Amino acid sequence: MKKEELFSGKPIIEVKGLVAKYDELTILDGISVDIYPGEITVILGGSGCGKTTLLKNMLRLYEPAAGSVKFWGDEILDMGENEFYAVLKRTGMLFQNGALLNSIPVYDNVSIPLEMHTDLSTKVIDRIIRVKLHLVGLGHAIYKFPSELSGGMKKRASLARALALDPEILFCDEPSAGLDPVTSESLDNLILNLKHQLKMTIVIVTHELASIHRIADKIIFLDDGKMLFYGNLQAAKQAGIEPIDHFFEVGRF
Amino acid sequence: MYLKLSNNVLVLEGVFTKENVPSAEKELSKLLKSSIQEQVTMIDLGGIESLDSAGVSFLDEVHQHFGQKSGILLFRGAKSEVQAVIDTFTTINLPIVAANREMGTFEQLGHNAIAFYYSMIEALTLASEIFYYSAVGLFNAKSRRKGSTIQQAALLGSQALPIVALLSFIIGFILSLQSGVQLKNFGAGVFLADLLAITMVREMGPLITSIIVAGRSGSAIASEIATMQVTEELDALRMMSLHPIRFVVVPKFHAITFVMPILVMFSILVAEIGGGLIALVLLDTSMETFIDRSIEIISIKDIIISFGKSIWFAWVIVIVGSYYGFQVKGGAEGVGRATTAAVVSSIFAVILFDAVFSLLYL
């Protein structure tokens, strides 16, 4: 992240009027949001409200039915494949179920983006892989195959792969779901560390209230395909919007 | 320039990110070729503007090279934000994890032999369980779901009819064409009916049908069971006190035992039609003569062998498919591997048993 970008006050991602559909069924209806550099933005809402759909439409993993998505000021929906891949190289994604390549060990999963997109030497690549896996707590499992890992370990290996190229924007789909509270907290600390040390912009889909309280700078609250709120957590709690109040009330511990 | 030597101090300057590190690495390798490395006692990081994990890994490489030579090496002057990134991504104190050791040739051979021995035991155990539960299932209606055998018979049998018919017709046609021409040269065209009937009933009918069923239904059995294994459906059955073999495999076993002889009979009939066409057009043999000679040459023993073979092959296909399905490891990747292995192994086993049958019943 360049300093001038970080402090320019311009959004790093601009979503305007985003509509997402599965066949005739409208999943997201006119979502507009600006995401600013160096911030952790959490997308939350009930199950089936369109959180993952929003994330995947922002990244064109699903093609939006209408609307506009800009990364660093450039419209990605009009981009050609090569131009769009150049944008994706500056981003990383942690998928809900890890999405590791099952036929190769964890080490190779992390090395693929480094080998394919950089001219770094094997020694440097080896160090990067080891430190990234160590950061996510998988330093002992680098030569294991994904089938030998638990669900939480797969997720952490996927995070190491997403971090391989030090992305400027990191997208995480339910990073803490299914993890024990201690691992979940250490993952949150890692995310905060990435934000502070590397000035990474992070967009996270999660249900975990403890995580939201630990890491969120801003929240996007979705309900039935519509955005009910975008702003900081305290403001959301004081906004007096019934579904948001209910969400935090029910989840309180 | 990223690296500069000044009074025993190696000065690093500029941006050290994944885009720039390859150039810095080239400068480092030039420096290492010269003799100055022994003079370096300190590395000045004050000139580093920014860096990422690739930059930190490069610094670790520098540290390793110069630290080993000079013995004492100090880093100094890093800006606080640069130092924070170094602290996050340094590999200096990471524990070394040894890669899995590769086996030698003989060790690998021994390992494979032991694995083969255990897999044969597992396959035979599975086969005995399938036979046991199939026999029990015949007399105990409660042990299987209503309609499951009929459903499997439709899947494994009737849906395979078109492809079995098409391929059998073509094979009967080709066999008759190739041998008919030779027989005609010797004036023995009328014996085409004998040749085709014996070949199809004793050999090609059961073999071709089994190969088609192995490719079509063997793969379906393996992938279905493997998917159920991966998605914990088999565990769910066990938790409902239902034996997976009894619930999943036995209906397939009963169905294929019943439909395979029918498929083979159908294959022989269609191949005879293909051969009959050649006899009629190429050899001027009447259809009546062709049918008469075909029926005359086939004995009851041939038909029993044919159906016996086809039932045996059917059992082999179900047992091999189920074995690979139950053995699956990993996720979707494992299902693909199990399916491929099931098809290859069942076709191999069918051809092997066919050779054994041919030797036993010449």
Image (tube, grey):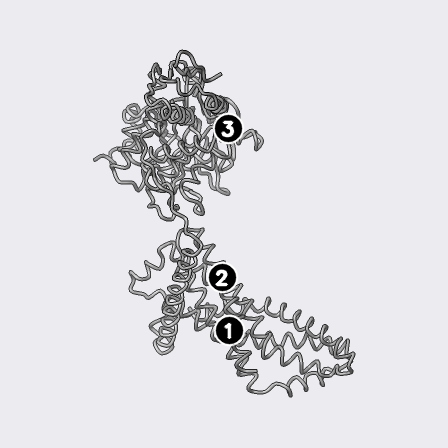
Three-letter amino acid code at the position of disc 2: Ser
- Image x and y of residue A232, in percent: 32, 24
**Where is mark 2, residue-wise?**
B219
Which amino acid type corresponds to the residue marked 1 in the rendered image?
Answer: Phe
Foreground residue among B267 and A111: A111
User: From what the image shows, is residue B72 above or below residue A146?
Assistant: above
- Whichever of callouts 1 and 2 sits on the residue coming sooner in the sequence is 2
Disc number lying in front (1 or 3) = 1
Q: Residues within 10 Å of mark 3 (few under 14, many from 20)?
A: some
Label 1 chain ID: B
- Viewport quadrant of the N terminus of chain A: top left
Whether residue A200 appears in this view of the structure is: no
The residue where tag 1 is placed is B353
Q: Mark 2 Cα within 10 Å, few/some/many (few <14, many 20+)?
A: many
Q: Using the image as rendered, state which of residue A90 and residue B258 is in the foreground.
A: A90
**Residue B48 in the image: x percent, y percent?**
41, 16
Amino acid type shown at disc 3: Val
Snapshot quadrant of residue A40: top left
Q: Residue at x 68, y 73 (%)?
A: B175
Residue B232: quadrant of the picture: bottom left
Q: Which mark is residue A87?
A: 3
Residue B308 vertical position relative to residue B166 in the rendered view, above or below:
below
Spot occupied by residue B258 in the image (x, y as percentages of width and height): 48, 75
Discs 1 and 3 share one subunit: no
Question: For the residues marked 1 and 2, what is the alpha-carbon distance in whole angstroms?
Answer: 19 Å
**Within-10-Å neighbours for mark 1: few <14, some 14–19, many 20+:** some
Q: Would residue A155 be seen by someone viewing this image from the given angle? A: yes
Q: How far across and how far down the image is residue B269, in percent?
A: 62, 77
SS of the residue under disc 2: helix
